Amino acid sequence: MVIVAGNPGVSQAELAAALEVERPRMVPMLNKLEKRGLAKRTALAADGRVRLIQLTKEGVQLLKVLRKHAEEVNRHHLSLLTAAEAKTIFSSLWKVARNPLERPAGRRSKHRNSLPEELH
């Protein structure tokens, strides 16, 4: 939902590439989002096979609630740490996030650079 919110009209193929999942695996997830009224897919006028994804008002609202809740949880957990401990944890997490396990040749997404920096 975060990627769709930041890239309204992203295609199913682009979303799958950004998440580094196979396109067929996106369909059940998108079906559930649509069934719950959180997202909608529309066919591209020039090519009806291409589906563009957008969050609905309800989806945008839920994402706001989820982000607020995540911020509250993070704030609580950080309050348990000293500033030095928090700095150590975050620097370690960013180090791990920026150096993922190597994947077999050909499996790395071509669209990795299209993700927001915080998702790299």
Image (cartoon, rainbow, N blue to C red):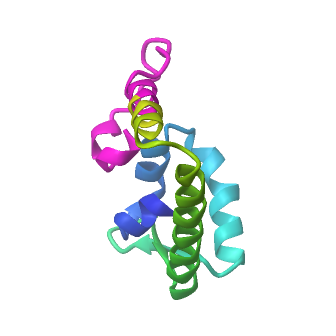
Q: Nearer the viewer, residue 112 or 73?
A: 73
Q: Residue at the far front: name it.
A: 82
Residue found at x 59% / y 51%: 77
Counting every numbered tag in the picture gives 0
Q: Is residue 62 above or below residue 116?
A: below
Is 6 on the left or on the right of 21, as rendered? left
Figure quadrant of the C terminus: top left
Residue 50 visible in the current orientation: no
Please provide the residue range marked out in magenta.
92-120
Quarter where residue 18 is shown: top left
Residue found at x 52% / y 68%: 67
Residue 40 visible in the current orientation: yes
Residue 102: image location, x then y, percent = 46, 14
Is 11 on the left or on the right of 64, as rendered? left
Query: Does residue 94 show up magenta in the picture?
Result: yes
Quarter where residue 98 is shown: top left
Q: Nearer the viewer, residue 79 or 45?
A: 79
Residue found at x 51% / y 87%: 57
Q: Is residue 25 above or below residue 106?
A: below
Q: Nearer the viewer, residue 73 or 119?
A: 73
Q: Is residue 17 above or below residue 28?
A: above
Residue 117: image location, x then y, percent = 30, 45
Q: Is residue 38 above or below residue 84?
A: below
Query: Does residue 16 show up magenta in the picture?
Result: no
Residue found at x 37% / y 70%: 8
Q: Nearer the viewer, residue 104 or 68?
A: 68
Residue 1: image location, x then y, percent = 52, 63
Is 39 on the left or on the right of 14, as rendered? right
Residue 76: image location, x then y, percent = 59, 59
